[in-house]
Image (cartoon, rainbow, N blue to C red):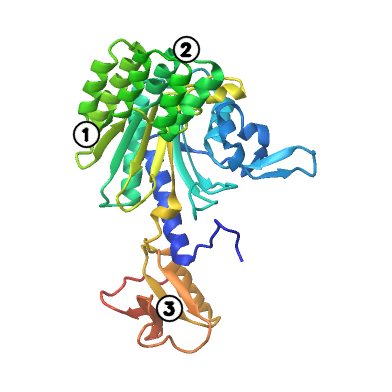
Amino acid sequence: MLPAGFEDMGPQQAAALEGKRRELLDLFASWGYRQVIPPMLEHLEGLLTGSAIDLDLETWKVLDQASGRVLGFRSDMTPQMARIDVQMARGDEARRLSYAGTVLRARPDALGGSRAPFQVGAEMFGVASADADLEILSLMVESVQRCCPGTELVLDLGHVAISQCLAEACGLGQQDREELLRFLERKAWPDLRQLLQANAVPAQQAEAFRALSELHGDHEILDRARQRFASYPVILRALEELDFVWQVLAQRYPQLSIRADLAEMQGHRYHTGMLFALFSPQQGAAIARGGRYDGVGKAFGRYRPATGFSLDLRPLLRDLTEERNSPRVLAPGGSDPSLWQAIQDLRAQGYTVVQDLAGGAPAQPLPAGFDACLVVEGGRWTLAGREPEFPFSAS
């Protein structure tokens, strides 16, 4: 009955998702990230401006009957965050924003994937340094640890400036350069070599790409990259940024496995600096992704440095059941004023109270899912149930 890529969430899953949503937004707030709630639907040009043009194929489009303009359902909240940042801008101060909500995609990221991810994320605007990337990375790690406690995590690092610098050094035309970057994004090394040969790219530049294809793994690849690309100042700066965040993260999160792929180019038309993604052996795809995307606000009238991350909360909670923080009480049906007052008192004290509208006394033993029942003893309403006894102060 539902289209491919869409699914209902039952009460337990919905409660688990809502609980984690609140927990993550509270975590973000404790770091200074303020929640914003953008609309689900916007004018299409507002969603696809600048570097966000790559979202075109993923965006559902409808015609606005009021204005005749084309509208789009958001497929990613990041462009909306950039617009909101520009609208809030007062000088060049740093701004930290967070968000949580459903996005809609015309096609899933993977076969059988969701077309309605529940996207949660945080963005920092106005800070161009690697310190901002480090803060976002740390927040991403802690967010996933909250969602998947005890799970082994692997962090992948990359930097688009490395491949972009080598591509520019080849002296290719715009079309060939874009094709080269697409080959890099897909790791299509045979196609890339063929393109370099067809354009008579000097052997030194071609060899640089061959070396780049081998630079993935542990921390020692940064030293190898420094030696290989010592004549490229842009690449050396990128390596310094990667080394900085690597060293600090290794100290903060000793159990976190960190590796780098210096040829990583996913989202190269969107990102402008560091890239990062968190993986788990239990998940085939990345759990969370992020990176630097300076200038995304330029389409809205102002250039702003920006870095951030997002994750889809739904797949992380598939095996998570509802966490009940309050005892569940079964109360008898009826409209007796004293019963009503007792129920209201319990709810005010944090209990979950469900009335048995079938009538009669509460079933004994207690049905599954309940911790106590509300009964009359000595002319007063009181709780009776499993040990330990529950404190209840009636009005």
Amino acid marked by disc 2: Gly
Quadrant assignment for the N terminus: bottom right
Q: Residue at x 27, y 35 (%)?
A: 259
Q: Are marks 2 and 3 in contact (CB under 8 Å)?
A: no
Left or right: residue 260 versus residue 184 is: left
* Location of residue 263 by image quarter: top left
Which of label 1 and label 3 is nearer to you? 1
Depth check, front residue: 160 or 316: 160
Q: Which residue is mark 1?
A: 250
In what element is the residue under mark 3? Answer: strand
Q: Position of residue 211 (x, y in %)?
A: 30, 23
- 275 above or below 196? below
Q: Position of residue 37 (x, y in %)?
A: 55, 41
The answer to whether residue 17 is seen in the rendering is: yes
Which of label 2 and label 3 is nearer to you? 2
Amino acid marked by disc 1: Ala
Which of label 1 and label 2 is nearer to you? 2
Mark 1 to mark 2 CA distance (whole Å) = 38 Å
Q: Residue at x 44, y 88 (%)?
A: 361
Name the mark on residue 330: 3
Specify few, some or many for label 3: CA neighbours under 10 Å numbering under 14, 14-19, or 20 or more. many
Q: Position of residue 320 (x, y in %)?
A: 37, 61
Q: Earlier in the sequence, mark 2 or mark 3?
A: 2
Q: Which residue is mark 2?
A: 171
Q: Residue at x 39, y 82 (%)?
A: 367
